[in-house]
């Protein structure tokens, strides 16, 4: 059978190196892993970390304000408090595994979701025409190492944060199988070969958009071969909530637990664009936003516990970010419109838990009678400082070439 | 912009936009007919493509541009052509199935293509707050108005309950101490995503536009959702949008004029026509959108009163459209891939349409359930990893023999073999390479497919026609071809 198989290959595809089809062997563990979670929609910073007793907060949030009695304390000397649904974050914070980066943003903030997230993805507050994402630049500089898949994107669509590099988009490893239902298994093997080798030939032989499609398709097959079976023996070592984000994080945990040499993971969770009915009128601690926070924080904590239980807790750092925080003043529909200034988190055992950056001066930014924002000012932390922290202190690469400038890392790592 | 407007001369403003005429060296042929049918529709069966070559290019474009006005039904039992019955519930899955059925069987595919374009442009997710029963009425706007006036389309979408709920305009003007409070969600996206594009307005314009839109709501949110205008929720007084003053009374329905004036203000911006024309061009023609060609179309679109049908007529008849700068220059959307495959190869019974909807969803197109108001960029983003495997596995499902519950049960593998009298391996391979991928296949890969035909498993056993072997080999061949990157090119 071997000879005829070789004959088949030779007849059509002798030039294609079969090495290209070889699936990779996972390398040893111990490598550092970075997991970025984008919280899409613009989260309401002031109802996550709550200046409950502050008169400006109380004035700006007549219906959405959460009374201090319902909150959880962050630190004894701080008058901002956790939303009760962020109890999992509170417990991460208390064990020293969570850094709160207060008042994060960028100069000349943009109120558009799409423009703002573009700036975050590009690590460039002036991003007009988007070329590369900051994690794409990291990979483009070769920092991913000589492995087939240094990064994966666990979300429905490719994230621009990886623009400039070719990163597979995966939600379900089961779907990485090429299915065949022909009457003999050998014929299916011929079919698989015809598809994979035919694709690679097309990449070499054609031009224009067909060649681009062929290159993307060839990559998809390579990625699928590399990722289909890696970590297939994984099962969670903690209980996760039954949410979409939890499924995405379980997939990351599967590859991390099996020491698959993937350095970067990007995930996205949605629904935070809370223009209306963030909470019911009679209970500001309940409703839509409370559910979003509970689902988010439960999933992140479960993931960190899982990788700790798999013995990789000291290798994993998670970053949570959102395109902006919301307006200080609520909008009359039990919601909040787009704002400036937000919050970011770094989480995991390697993180030095605590608060970083400066708390916004609510009295100083108040604009009576206006719908107002947390401005980007001397009290703000540039989001590129957060990236510099991750790049310099965690991934241990120079951040200048990736961020296009020098930004002081925070001591959270 | 005004300089560009003055520079435009001639009825089409640019040589590339003049109507393409067949000639001896550049004839109306199978390749061009297939191109037009794929772009202005979802492709066609081989014999339909051949018939179209006989009928001529102008005839086909005229038919495509003048669809009927039949809406999709929102509820009840529908008896379809062929006597099949579709039980419509108000759930998204059956509504997706209905629309896909219409795309496969409908006589006016361009109407559906335009509707899909506008659906992606306005990008509503009806799952927000359980407004699923509104989705058919929502896409019927695009099916009715998608080739009409863009001004009317904007107005209809602005008062559409699905949109009013999706971007919260039903709460724009909620009273606080008797004063309407604005909600900027729809106002912002109307400027940024639906008309002008980023960078062409200021935050103050968002606020003022939102004031114009205040009071436009629904009768009972998430209940009986009908459009309603509530004067007491409308911000009175003049509004200043993009340098214009919008000033109407606020008695009764006088304040509604604000939205009409707002839409006229948006349309008066040069950025608006450019934004829309460029997006249409990239969806229907090419990712290559030369500035001077777009300039000429923008001029015409504005002069024509934002009439989409005239714009599409110029585009689809143009020299550019029938040139190699456009032919096979786009990536099939999941809808184009799935509906196109069905139209090319055989039509499953209606019970299978929910399965088709699942495939389209897993390839990345969430009909009726967009997650953000920005739509999907499409293009090569469709080929971003897992979705490539989904495309290949859809081909597997479509050509699979042994599963009566799946879509492949309706694939008649010998239909083309008998009809086109294909008897040798070469004839079969050449036929499907021509009709599925326009002969766009390297010779090595074609040779590889021939080898597939001439083998049984790994053993070389030259193809000799018999129906059983032809059935098996055609299924395998079509599966392989549809899983190759060339099939994803449109």
Image (cartoon, rainbow, N blue to C red):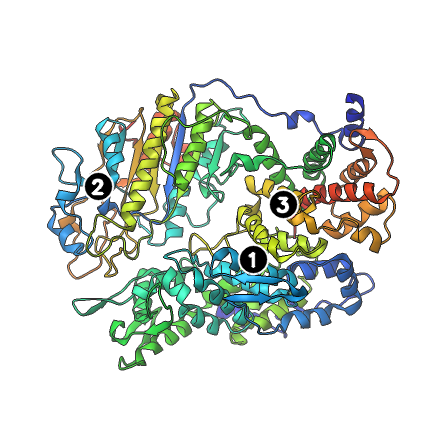
**Chain at numbered mark 1:** B
Callouts 2 and 1 in the same chain: no
Q: Are marks 3 and 1 in contact (CB under 8 Å)?
A: no
What residue did someone put label 1 on? B97
Residue A82 placement (x, y as % from top left): 20, 40
Label 1: which secondary element: helix
Viewer-side residue, A75 vs A295:
A295
Callouts 2 and 3 in the same chain: no
Label 3: which secondary element: helix
Q: Residue A182 carries which label?
A: none
Going from the N terminus, do you reach mark 3 or mark 1 first?
1
Q: How far apart are marks 2 and 3 (CA)?
A: 45 Å
What residue did someone put label 2 on? A84
Q: Residues within 10 Å of mark 2 (few under 14, many from 20)?
A: many
**Chain at numbered mark 2:** A
Residue B64 placement (x, y as % from top left): 65, 69
What residue did someone put label 3 on? B394
Viewer-side residue, B191 vs A218:
A218
Left or right for B115, reference A253: right
Viewer-side residue, A23 vs A171:
A171
Q: Are marks 2 and 3 in contact (CB under 8 Å)?
A: no
Callouts 3 and 1 in the same chain: yes
Left or right for B321, reference A292: right
**In the rendered image, which quarter is residue B319 located in?**
bottom right
**Chain at numbered mark 3:** B
């Amino acid at each position: 059978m071997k000879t005829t198989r070789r004959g088949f290959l030779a007849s059509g595809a002798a030039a294609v190196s079969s090495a290209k089809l070889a699936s990779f062997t996972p390398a040893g563990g111990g490598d550092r892993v970075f997991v970025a979670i984008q919280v899409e929609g613009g989260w309401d910073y002031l109802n996550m970390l709550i200046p409950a007793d502050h008169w400006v907060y109380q004035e700006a949030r007549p219906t959405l304000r959460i009374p201090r009695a319902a909150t959880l304390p962050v630190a004894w000397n701080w008058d901002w408090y956790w939303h009760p649904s962020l109890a999992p974050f509170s417990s991460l914070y208390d064990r020293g595994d969570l850094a709160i980066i207060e008042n994060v943003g960028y100069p000349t903030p943009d109120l558009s979701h799409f423009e703002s997230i573009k700036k975050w993805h590009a690590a460039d507050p002036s991003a007009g025409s988007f070329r590369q994402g900051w994690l794409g630049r990291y990979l483009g500089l070769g920092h991913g190492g000589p492995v087939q898949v240094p990064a994966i994107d666990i979300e429905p669509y490719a994230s621009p944060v990886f623009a400039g590099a070719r990163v597979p988009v995966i939600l379900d490893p089961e779907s990485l199988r090429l299915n065949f239902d022909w009457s003999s298994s050998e014929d299916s093997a011929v079919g698989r070969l015809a598809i994979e080798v035919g694709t690679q030939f097309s990449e070499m032989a054609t031009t224009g958009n067909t060649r681009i499609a062929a290159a993307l398709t060839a990559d998809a097959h390579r990625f699928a071969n590399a990722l289909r079976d890696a970590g297939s023996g994984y099962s969670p070592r903690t209980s996760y909530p039954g949410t979409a984000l939890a499924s995405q994080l379980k997939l990351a945990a599967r590859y991390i637990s099996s020491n698959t040499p993937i350095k970067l993971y990007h995930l996205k969770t949605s629904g935070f664009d809370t223009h209306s009915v963030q909470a019911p009128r009679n209970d500001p601690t309940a409703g839509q936003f409370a559910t979003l926070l509970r689902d988010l924080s439960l999933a992140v904590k479960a993931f960190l516990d899982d990788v700790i239980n798999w013995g990789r807790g000291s290798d994993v750092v998670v970053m949570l970010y959102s395109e902006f925080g919301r307006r200080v003043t609520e909008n009359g529909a039990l919601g909040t419109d787009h704002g400036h200034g937000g919050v970011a988190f770094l989480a995991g055992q390697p993180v030095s838990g605590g608060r970083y950056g400066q708390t916004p001066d609510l009295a100083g930014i108040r604009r009576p009678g206006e719908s107002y924002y947390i401005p980007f000012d001397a009290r703000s932390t540039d989001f590129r400082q957060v990236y510099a922290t991750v790049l310099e202190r965690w991934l241990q690469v120079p951040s200048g070439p990736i961020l296009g400038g020098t930004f002081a890392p925070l001591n959270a790592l | 912009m005004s300089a560009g407007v003055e520079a435009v001369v001639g009825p089409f403003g640019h040589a590339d936009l003049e109507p393409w005429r067949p000639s001896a060296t550049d004839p109306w042929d199978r390749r061009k007919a297939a191109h037009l049918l794929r772009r202005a529709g979802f492709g066609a069966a081989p014999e339909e493509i051949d018939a179209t070559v006989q009928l001529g290019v102008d005839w086909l474009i005229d038919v495509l541009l003048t669809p009927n006005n039949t809406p999709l039904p929102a509820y009840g039992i529908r008896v379809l052509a062929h006597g099949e019955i579709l039980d419509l519930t108000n759930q998204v899955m059956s509504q997706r199935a209905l629309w896909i059925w219409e795309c496969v069987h409908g006589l006016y595919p361009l109407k559906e293509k335009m509707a899909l374009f506008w659906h992606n442009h306005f990008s509503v997710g009806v799952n927000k707050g359980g407004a699923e029963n509104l989705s058919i009425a929502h896409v019927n706007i695009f099916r009715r108005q998608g080739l009409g006036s863009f001004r009317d389309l904007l107005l209809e979408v602005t008062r559409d309950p699905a949109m009013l709920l999706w971007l919260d305009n039903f709460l724009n003007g909620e009273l606080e101490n008797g004063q309407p409070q604005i909600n900027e969600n729809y106002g912002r996206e109307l400027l940024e995503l639906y008309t002008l594009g980023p960078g062409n307005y200021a935050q103050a314009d968002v606020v003022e536009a939102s004031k114009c839109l205040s009071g436009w709501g629904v009768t009972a949110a998430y209940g009986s959702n009908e459009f309603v205008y509530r004067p007491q929720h409308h911000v009175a007084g003049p509004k200043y949008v993009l340098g214009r003053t919008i000033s109407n009374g606020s008695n009764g329905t006088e304040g509604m004029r604000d939205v009409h004036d707002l839409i006229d203000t948006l349309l008066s911006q040069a950025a608006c026509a450019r934004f829309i024309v460029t997006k249409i061009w990239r969806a229907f023609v090419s990712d290559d959108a030369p500035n001077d060609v777009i300039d000429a179309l923008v001029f015409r679109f504005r002069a024509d009163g934002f009439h989409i049908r005239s714009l599409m007529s110029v585009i689809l008849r143009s020299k550019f459209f029938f040139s190699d700068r456009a032919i096979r220059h786009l990536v099939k959307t999941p809808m184009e891939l799935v509906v196109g495959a069905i139209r090319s190869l055989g039509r499953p019974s209606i019970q299978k349409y929910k399965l088709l909807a699942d495939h389209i969803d897993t390839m990345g197109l969430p009909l009726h359930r967009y997650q953000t108001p920005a739509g999907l960029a499409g293009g090569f983003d469709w080929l971003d990893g897992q979705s490539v495997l989904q495309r290949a596995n859809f081909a597997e499902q479509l050509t699979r023999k042994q599963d009566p519950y799946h879509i492949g049960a309706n694939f008649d593998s010998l239909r083309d073999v008998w009809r086109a009298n294909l008897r040798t391996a070469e004839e079969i391979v050449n036929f499907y390479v021509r009709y599925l991928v326009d002969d766009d296949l390297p010779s090595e890969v074609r040779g590889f497919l021939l080898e597939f035909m001439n083998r049984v498993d790994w053993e070389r056993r030259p193809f000799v026609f018999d129906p059983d072997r032809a059935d098996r080999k055609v299924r395998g061949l079509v599966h392989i071809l549809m899983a190759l990157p060339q099939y994803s090119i449109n």
